[in-house]
Image: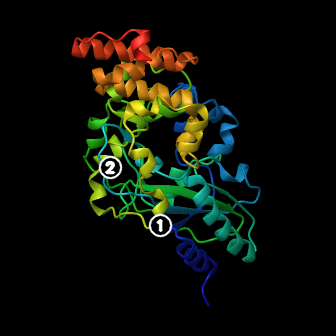
Amino acid sequence: MPTPAERIKTAAREAGFDDCRIAAAGRATHADAFMEWLDDGRHGEMKWMEKTPERRCDPREVLPGCRSVVTLALNYYPGRSPDTSWRIARYAWNDDYHDLIERKLRQLDRVMTDLGGTQRYYVDHGPVLERDFATDAGLGWSGKSTVQIHRHLGTWFFLAELLTTLDLPADPPFGDHCGKCTRCIDACPTDAITAPHRLDARRCISYLTIENPGPIPEEFREAIGDRLYGCDECLDVCPWNRFAKESREARFHAREEVFSMKARDFLALTDEEFRALFRKSPIKRIKRARFLRNVCVVLGNTGTAEDLPALERAARDVDPLVSEHAGWAIRQIEARTSVRPSGPEEAD
């Protein structure tokens, strides 16, 4: 007769998760470090993290009677990057992972309810310091970049968890296996990893291109390079990725209609067209203005005279977030190519 823990792990595999391990509920290992991180303002404009921070530090504050945390990993590695002049973080190449994973979590929740448990489940949007519990359960370890690393999946996986009132035996931790490696720290384009296990979100390209609601500070624009949305640099260089295999989930692979576009093509998108192109994509969440802001920065770094007409039109966009970044991009291309931008009539 399988134990409850064995039944849960079998159900997790059947739901499509790549790993499932269990941690004891309690105050998170790095709760004090998290509170200090907030006090220092290193979370930038992510004000939602400031709300009831104590709940994030202890799952028993979220689910009364919580005894265990079931931690899960889902491989999303979509393989090699398509041949484009711009980059999007791999997790956002296609459908939004939240919807897909939540369906799997509901399936697992039903199994655990049948075992007598009450659950709350999350995939990176709930008040849980998920990497602490994943590390406690042996679901990899938190790397020096603060990204979770799995011994078989490398860095290319999503974390999810179910808080439960079931009293389940905890799995042993796997330990930290980064050793003396500092590749992630050395590779960060904006020096956002200020020390091992210390990240200043305000400098991180993923934060700047996604969570940041306003203009991208000019001091970071050139470092963004060709990154339209997010950044995989610290993940790409991790040596543990030699074990990574492509995800079995086709909905994580590159969306053809997006990756067939040139960067300047995005600037012509109306709000309706933007929402249609990125339907069910996590990119849709940042909305048109923020995305076109990012496109302008990329063109400022990589564009040529051929991109100037599109940027001239963007410079007249009604949204100041788009127009200001388009103007910056034009000046960058002018300085780099010694080509004067066309006038308004020619740009039309």
Q: With 86 as the anchor, is 169 left or right in this view?
A: right
Which quarter of the figure has residue 23? bottom right
Nearer-the-camera pick, 12 or 313 = 313
Above or below: residue 192 compared with residue 217: below
For the N terminus, which image quadrant?
A: bottom right
Furthest-bottom residue in view? 1
Check disc 2 and give the amino acid type.
Pro
On the image, the x and y values in percent for residue 294 come to 44, 28
* Residue 172 tag number: 1
Mark 1 neighbour class, 10 Å CA radius: few under 14, some 14 to 19, many 20 or more:
some
Q: Earlier in the sequence, mark 2 or mark 1?
A: 2
In this figure, which residue is indicated by the disc labeled 2?
82
- What residue sits 41% from the left and 53% below the top? 254
**Quarter of the image where one finds residue 233:** top left
Residue 263, given in percent of the width and then of the height, sits at 38, 33
Disc 1 marks a residue whose amino acid type is Pro
The answer for how far apart the CA atoms under marks 2 and 1 are is: 39 Å
Residue 134 location in percent, x, y?
51, 57
Number of residues whose C-alpha sits closer than 10 Å to that of mark 2, classed few (under 14), some (14–19) or many (20 or more): few
* Front label number (2 vs 1): 2
Q: Residue at x 36, y 54 (%)?
A: 176
* Side of 21 where 102 appears, left or right: right
